[in-house]
Image (cartoon, rainbow, N blue to C red):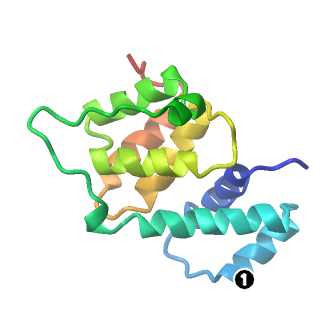
């Protein structure tokens, strides 16, 4: 089985965090469950580091200062390689519609860049957005919108 860090994260999200967010779980029991599900120890370790780094991004000193007309995000060449025009457009759509604020957008980009994938497609991006929103207090409405957008039979157009 050739799994990625994102595969491990999605498994954790769907089977542990999303299924019962109030349950207290220790890393050892989740790691045992992941090993039993067939994930490699290396990918499991990378996924836990990814989650720890996501929690570390919650510090207010890492915030993006607001501007009067809204921030302009210029993507580096490396970010453009990882996030194609469709993904960048979707991030802009989410920000313009109040689903993500500039700080959350930066968290999403940071977490996308931390994945060990050369390119990220739109579905992967949506999952990362959902995980970032899930891990932030006060984003329940944005999380619910994103969740309904992802699982709707006829999702809204993104343009």
Q: Residue 152, image x and y in percent?
A: 50, 31
- Badge count: 1
- 57, above or below 124, in the image: below
- x 91%, y 49%: residue: 1
User: Is residue 11 in sight in this rendering?
Assistant: yes
- 13, above or below 128, in the image: below
Q: Residue 115, image x and y in percent?
A: 63, 49
Q: Residue furthest front?
A: 77
- x 26%, y 31%: residue: 96
Residue tagged 1? 28
Q: Residue 43, image x and y in percent?
A: 77, 61
- 159, above or below 101, in the image: above
User: Counting other residues with Cα less than 10 Å from the Cα at mark 1, is it few (<14), some (14-19), or many (20 or more)?
Assistant: few
SS category of the residue bearing label 1: helix
Query: Residue 153 appears in which quarter of the rendering?
Result: top right
Foreground of the two, 92 or 151? 92
Foreground of the two, 74 or 127? 74
- x 19%, y 50%: residue: 65
Foreground of the two, 73 or 141? 73
User: Is residue 101 in sight in this rendering?
Assistant: no
- x 83%, y 61%: residue: 39
Q: Residue furthest left?
A: 68
Q: Residue 129, image x and y in percent?
A: 47, 45
Foreground of the two, 16 or 77? 77
Q: Quadrant of the C terminus?
A: top left
Instruction: Determine whether, in the image, residue 44 is placed left or right of residue 103.
Output: right
Instruction: Determine whether, in the image, residue 125 is placed left or right of residue 99.
Output: right
Query: Residue 82 appears in which quarter of the rendering?
Result: top right
């Amino acid at each position: 089985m050739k799994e990625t860090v994102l595969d491990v994260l999605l498994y954790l999200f769907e089977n542990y965090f999303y299924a019962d967010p109030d349950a207290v779980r220790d890393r050892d029991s989740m790691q045992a469950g992941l090993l039993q599900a067939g994930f490699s120890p290396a990918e499991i370790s990378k996924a836990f580091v990814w989650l720890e780094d996501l929690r570390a991004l919650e510090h207010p000193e890492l915030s993006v200062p607001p501007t009067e007309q809204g921030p302009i995000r210029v993507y580096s060449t490396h970010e453009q390689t990882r996030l194609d025009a469709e993904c960048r457009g979707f991030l802009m759509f989410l920000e313009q519609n109040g689903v993500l604020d500039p700080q959350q957008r930066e968290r999403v980009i940071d977490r996308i860049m931390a994945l060990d994938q050369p390119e990220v497609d739109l579905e992967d991006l949506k999952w990362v957005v959902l995980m970032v929103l899930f891990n932030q207090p006060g984003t329940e409405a944005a999380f619910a919108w994103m969740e309904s957008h992802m699982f709707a039979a006829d999702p809204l157009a993104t343009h």
